[in-house]
Image: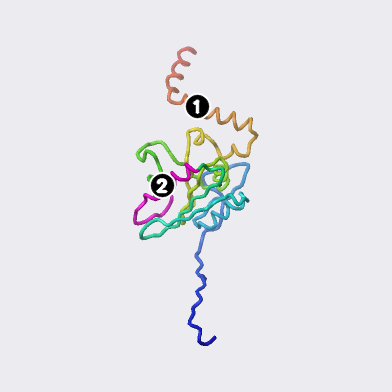
Amino acid sequence: MNNEKMIVALPLLEYKMRAITETSNENVIRGPKEAFVEDLPTNLTMIRRRIKTEKLSVETFHFGSLTKTRVSIVYIRGVCTEELLKEVKDRLSRIDIDGVLGTSYLESYLEDVPFSPFPQLQNTERPDVVVGALLEGRIAIFADGTPVPIIAPVTLFMLLQSTEDYYQRFIYATWARWLRLIFYVCFPFAPFLLSCSHKFSS
């Protein structure tokens, strides 16, 4: 044993990280209160705790020639389509920048129209929202150092959903979504409708 020329290196480095706390922007009455943190392994653990299947897949990459930031894409095999997975990987493969400090650095590379004023990806700080999106066949993208992953793809109807909808009866949730859609469509015509109602009342 004295003539052994081998060194054993053990990863004993420990980083200070923020404890899991209640969400600050997406509070709900019913449902869990916990939110993502800045530590990537902790965030992935929160997802695995909710989806207990071997079909849950996590692929990790490094972006940023200087920061070497770990970025993980999460999806469910058999639920997420191969076309969507290939498209996300192709767009991520085009990223060549010095540093990635959060998922916001990746958004412009994943969007179809980077200069559009309308959101093309969904941001959330809630694990249950990400799990709901994964069960719908979508992909979640996490970056080490940020508590806000992004979800792709997104549609107008998805943006009109509320976190509370996952914990309400389907009749109430469906009615609330239709009500939001009606108000969204009618909002540009609100001044005209108000003026008409004023004329009829007078």
Q: Position of residue 140 (x, y in %)?
A: 50, 47
The alpha-carbon separation of the residues under discs 2 and 1 comes to: 37 Å
Residue at 48% in and 12% down: 200
Residue at the spot of label 2: 90
Label 1 crowd bin: few (<14), some (14–19), many (20+), radius 10 Å? few
Residue 196: percent from left, percent from top:
45, 15
Location of residue 92 with respect to 187 vertically, above or below: below
Asked if residue 53 is among those painted magenta in the image, a careful observer would answer no
At label 2, counting other C-alpha atoms closer than 10 Å, the crowd grade (few under 14, some 14-19, many 20 or more) is few
Q: Position of residue 185 (x, y in %)?
A: 47, 25
93 magenta-colored: yes
Q: Which residue is mark 1?
A: 183
* Furthest residue toward bottom: 2
Coloring scheme of the render? rainbow
Residue nearest the observer in this picture, 136 or 169: 136
Tell me which amino acid carries mark 1: Phe
Kind of residue at badge 2? Asp
Start-end of magenta stretch: 82-104
Q: How many marks?
A: 2
Question: If the image is split into quadrants, where does the N terminus sit?
Answer: bottom right
Callout 1 secondary element: helix
